């Protein structure tokens, strides 16, 4: 990471306001956004048919859900990074409930995006226009593979949608909404923390940056830096095993492809979470950062391609599909793993250019 | 291409000897190599069982065939580039017969190398060692796909072998051997050409370089320069159609994948031939060039990966294979097309660094 003077990166808030003022301003605003978006998201879910065709009107109709997810991620991130300012039990409970809502609401849009990604890839691979045909141009298996993916992702989306409709009426969501209503009016800060000078938040943001830098350092960036190493298809497990959140499930001395791929992807997914936490920590301190947005986007593409590859591998195990269909799914699977590699290559070039943010100095405040 | 002074690149021969001396020395030596290698290659073919398992002793046993192919390519290249020095009918006939022997002898080793390439890729992709599992680790289709590829390439190799055994006893080969025997004792130069100063050969080598530079300029190097553009899988036909030796066979406004891929690969295969011609032309002039060797090797990998991808696509059309087998073949096909892209990316970085060779100045000699 290159050095950038700390003052050039930190906003005025952290310098002039108290910890209590800064956290209250931020969390009140985010809780307010949550409460404004919630009824809109509920209305969207209710008005949406369960098996709406992919794309079309549904993407625009999810604006409330997007806003809600945006607020949920930010409140959760702030409660994690600045945990010292809050009652530990209240913060832990709040984060648990926010994570529950996040995983509930994120599924349906994720299936929609995955459909769009995979069908676009398949259409591009099987494009028959002479100006730009794909390697599956005119292949008999392409329409069948397309129909299979569309059907399976449509079913997954319908299931996610049904769950959302049930949970949006649940006592659990009402309790979370009450919790956010309280947060919007008064942020429950610990007495000792509220009056501290704002610079204290910088040292806590520095911890978030330190965790990100530490995990990013352990990524196999050297491997990802060489384009077309083919490692993403051939040498999945060559990551340091010590930090793997999901250990490879050994079968004797062997592994299966699913667990090997999951173990290979896990450290990257973890770094994405840490990038988001660092990004929101800077937002709280009044210094939003375009470089972290870029990294977040790159690792978002990484995650979506990795998830899409899993969907294709699963679809290929559907009983009674034709060999032509399976063949096309094999090509699409490899294509998505190639997208995973491309995202890692991009991250490997973006990460070293990330400004230093002076977080090591903040830590001494 | 960067500029290198012509004198630093050209050997002493072209400066001090006549055209006749230089061409005679070179062709006599190559014809001699041909005649020494021919009985060894015949013996190798005769002692080789038709359906020998892939790899193993057969690779070492093909040294005579390799030497023979080496001489065939060089004589053919010199007769093409320096055609002005020879009787046109004799040179054209000789080149036709050399091309026939080249395509006859090159097939069996090519199937051997293709087997080794594809089985290694499949083994790597389905590797189950926890230290480096592949994306097909433990996949049920991998052993079946391996057996299918091994069987089909073994059959193709056996057919090629049978043809070689038949043709090695043919009158056509004896006539070619007689032709080479004559060439080894006296090179049939035109009277007017033999006494010219050696620099004339440089101007003829310059024409070979010019043809290479012209075709390389038309390659979509800009497209290949971006790693992970995914173009190799998605946008095959985006090459200028004017110079495609094998035009896309349109079905109405559509193309199929095989013809689209062939049209996409053809200009690269053509440039490989031109690289070889330029390489042998420099050899004749006494200035062998390590950079052209490198380009030749890169485009050789390109061709072998492209041919291997076709083999996999063909294998996937075998009736009654299981979906799991077809799926694995789809992954392997995409993997080989990725190797094609990797070779193009490498060429795109090697070509601009090729020293200029001063061929534009030679052309004015």
Image: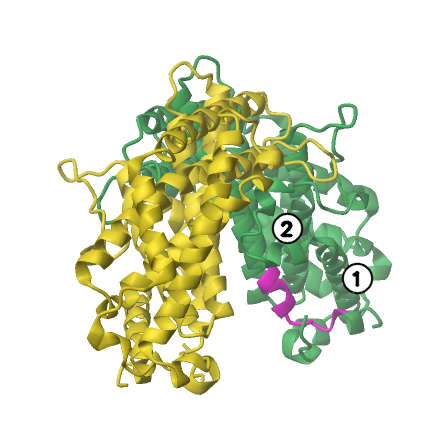
Chain colours: A green, B yellow
Residue A8 vertical position relative to residue A211 in the rendered view, above or below: below
The segment highlighted magenta reads A348-359
Does residue B75 show up magenta in the picture? no
C-alpha span from label 1 to label 2:
30 Å
A223 left or right, relative to B89: right
Density class for disc 2 (Cα within 10 Å; few <14, some 14-19, many ≥20) is many
Position of residue B264 measured from the top left corner of the image (x, y, whole percent): 31, 49
Between residue A311 and residue B355, name the one nearer to us. Answer: B355
Q: Quadrant of the C terminus of chain B?
A: bottom left
Position of residue B314 measured from the top left corner of the image (x, y, whole percent): 37, 29
Between residue A349 and residue A227, name the one nearer to us. Answer: A227
Residue A75 vertical position relative to residue B120 in the rendered view, above or below: below
Determine which quarter of the picture holds residue A81.
bottom right
Residue occupying image coordinates x 71% and y 29%: A255
Density class for disc 1 (Cα within 10 Å; few <14, some 14-19, many ≥20) is many
Q: Which mark is residue A194?
A: 1
Disc 1 on helix, strand or loop?
Answer: helix
Residue B237 vertical position relative to residue B254 in the rendered view, above or below: below
> Which chain's residue wears label 1?
A
Position of residue A168 measured from the top left corner of the image (x, y, whole percent): 54, 29
Residue position marked by numbered label 2 in the rendering: A272
Q: Which mark is residue A296?
A: none
Between residue A355 and residue A129, name the one nearer to us. Answer: A129
> Which chain's residue wears label 2?
A
């Amino acid at each position: 990471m290159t050095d950038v003077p700390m003052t050039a990166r930190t906003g005025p808030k952290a310098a002039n306001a108290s910890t209590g003022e800064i956290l209250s301003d931020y969390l009140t605003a985010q809780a307010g956004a949550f409460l404004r978006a919630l009824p809109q998201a509920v209305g969207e879910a209710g008005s949406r048919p369960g098996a709406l065709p992919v794309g079309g009107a549904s993407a625009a109709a999810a604006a409330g859900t997007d806003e809600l997810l945006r607020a949920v991620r930010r409140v959760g991130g702030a409660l994690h990074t600045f945990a010292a300012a809050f009652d530990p039990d209240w913060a832990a409970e709040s984060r648990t409930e926010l994570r529950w809502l996040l995983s509930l609401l994120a599924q349906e849009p994720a299936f929609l995006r995955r459909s769009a990604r995979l069908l676009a890839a398949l259409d591009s691979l099987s494009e028959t226009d002479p100006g730009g045909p794909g390697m599956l141009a005119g292949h008999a298996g392409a329409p069948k593979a397309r129909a299979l993916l569309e059907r399976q992702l449509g079913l997954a989306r319908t299931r996610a949608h049904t769950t959302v409709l049930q949970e949006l009426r649940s006592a659990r969501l009402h309790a979370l909404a009450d919790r956010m209503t309280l947060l919007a009016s008064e942020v429950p800060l610990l007495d000792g923390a509220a009056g501290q000078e704002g610079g204290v938040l910088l040292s806590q943001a520095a911890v978030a940056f330190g965790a990100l830098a530490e995990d990013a350092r352990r990524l196999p960036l050297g491997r990802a830096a060489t384009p077309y190493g083919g490692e993403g298809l051939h040498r999945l497990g060559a990551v340091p095993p010590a930090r793997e959140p999901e250990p490879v499930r050994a079968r004797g001395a062997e592994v299966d492809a699913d667990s090997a791929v999951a173990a290979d992807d896990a450290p990257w997914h973890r770094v994405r979470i840490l990038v988001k936490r660092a990004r929101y920590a800077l937002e709280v301190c009044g210094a939003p950062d375009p470089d972290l947005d870029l990294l977040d986007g790159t690792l978002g593409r990484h995650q979506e391609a990795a998830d899409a590859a899993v969907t294709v591998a699963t679809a290929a195990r559907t009983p009674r599909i034709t060999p032509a269909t399976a063949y096309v799914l094999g090509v699409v699977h490899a294509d998505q793993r190639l997208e995973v590699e491309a995202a890692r290559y991009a991250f490997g070039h973006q990460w070293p250019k990330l400004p230093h943010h002076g977080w090591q100095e903040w830590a001494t405040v």
